[in-house]
Amino acid sequence: MTVSSIFSQDPAKPFQLVKFLSWSSLVLIVGMSIFIVVILGNYAQKTVVEKDKDFALLLSENLNHQVFQRFILPTVMGFGEVQLEREAQYERLDQVVKSTIHGFKMLNLRIYDLDKEVSYSMSESEVGKTDLAGRAVSEAADGDFNFEVIKKDVSLWSYFQLQVPEESYVLRTTRPLRTEKSLSEKNKGKIIGILQFSQDITSDYKTIKYFQGIIAGVALLSSMVLFLVLYRIIVRADKILADRIQEKERMERLLHQNEKLASMGRVLSGIANKIKNPLSTIQTSARYLVKRFQSENNLEARFARSIFDESKKLSQAVDNFQHYAEPKQPRMEKVDLSGICKDALEFLEPETRNKRIQVKNNLLEGISISGDRELLFKVFYNILLNACQAVDPDGEIILQWNEQEKMLQVIDSGPGLDRETKEKCLEPFYTTQEQGVGLGLAIAENILKNHGASLKLENAKQSTGAEVRISFP
């Protein structure tokens, strides 16, 4: 099977393929955007961290030099040894440290002795503690440098709100505190303590995150715009194609149905003409018998009334067949719409009385339209008869007129229209009534079409029943 043959069988398949490709493209673009953002973000983070580490290394070298030159060397020369238990020595060291780190985002600074006890801290409450030293201090005691980035729990949404809390990212540097040659050449480079300090590098990470967000936002926005434009075109084209396919199928069904109905109409017309004359004789005879036995209530009178009633129903069915098979062309003249509806309601009065149906005729007098009074009477009779048959006892039928849209609305309180009934109710010979032939609405629609009017059935919005809308030109 060739590609052209596949597409000829289902014209919607090319658009299904385009839809798939558009969604795949969106996923690919978004995936690549995320991948690029992650790669660039990680590279930027590594670059910034390396920069911060280099800066921390220089700061630690300066601290080592300042502490040794300005505190340890003078203290040893003046007091013979360093004893931070003495308040004067501690204050001197504190002055040296604070003057060296002034202007830097230093959160804390500790100096451990070789026994891993805190000898000095910017937070005096930590002095003397031995449980603060970790693996980094142990490695520094062996001469290693250690850099550690400490991250607090930060939600991703906080970056978009520009509210990343301070101290969310902290760089902690741990290095040995060594002697310099100023003391003695022999002891140069000897480890005399461990220096550890923490710096707030949140602003650097915040910049990186904003950078990532801008890249991601631009990439996603551009891809979404392109996708939406493409998808809108596809959806529009797909809808047009689907409508054309649906219209083609509807026209094919309608043509096929009209061919069948035309043949059936010719047969029904011939049958109706043959039935009508004998039926007229039976109906006339039955009417005579009904009048003769009018004052009696015996078996003969009941038979006569039964024959007359059934012959009326059969005559109505034959008339419907003839009206459908040989529709009359309307004689257009000014007619009173409210008067025609009133006549149809009076004709149906026995039906509404037996079922105790409340009819609300909200039509004002003097609604003038152009049409054939006899044919329009048949339209409204059939529609109102359907409404009477649809509602339960003690139900309701409402007639109202929309002057702005030139539309008559017939609303009933029946069960409404299901999907199948709504689609087929205007088709000839489709009925939900046991005794109906299904021509009432079909005849009404044909008559209205010849009047330039339209018939539409919907489920009523203000009740559970159905609503018939007749729009006049």
Image (cartoon, helix red, strand yellow):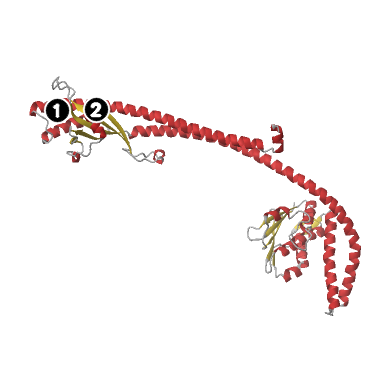
Q: Secondary structure at mark 2?
A: helix
Establish if 191 lies above or below 12.
Answer: above
Task: Name the residue rendered at 10%, 27% in the picture.
Answer: 76
State left or right for residue 168 relative to residue 5: left
The answer to whether one can see residue 142 in this image is yes
Above/below status of 153 relative to 445: above
Residue 328 visible to an observer of this rendering: no
Q: Relative to residue 395, is residue 472 depicted above or below? A: above
Going by the image, does 155 lie left or right of 192? Answer: right
> Which residue does the image show at 21% across and 39% down from the upper left?
131
Between residue 21 and residue 291, name the one nearer to us. 21
Closer to us: 307 or 385? 307
Residue 291 falls in which quadrant of the image?
A: bottom right
Of the numbered discs 2 and 1, the one sitting upstream in the chain is 2
Give how far across and how far down residue 110 sits, in percent: 21, 34
Q: Residue 60 has which mark?
A: 2
Amino acid at the residue labelled 2: Ser
Expressed as whole percent of the image width and height from the top left, the position of residue 324 reads: 83, 55
In the rendered view, would you say 303 is above or below 423?
below
Disc number at residue 72?
Answer: 1
The quarter holding residue 323 reads bottom right
Label count reads: 2
Element carrying mark 1 = helix
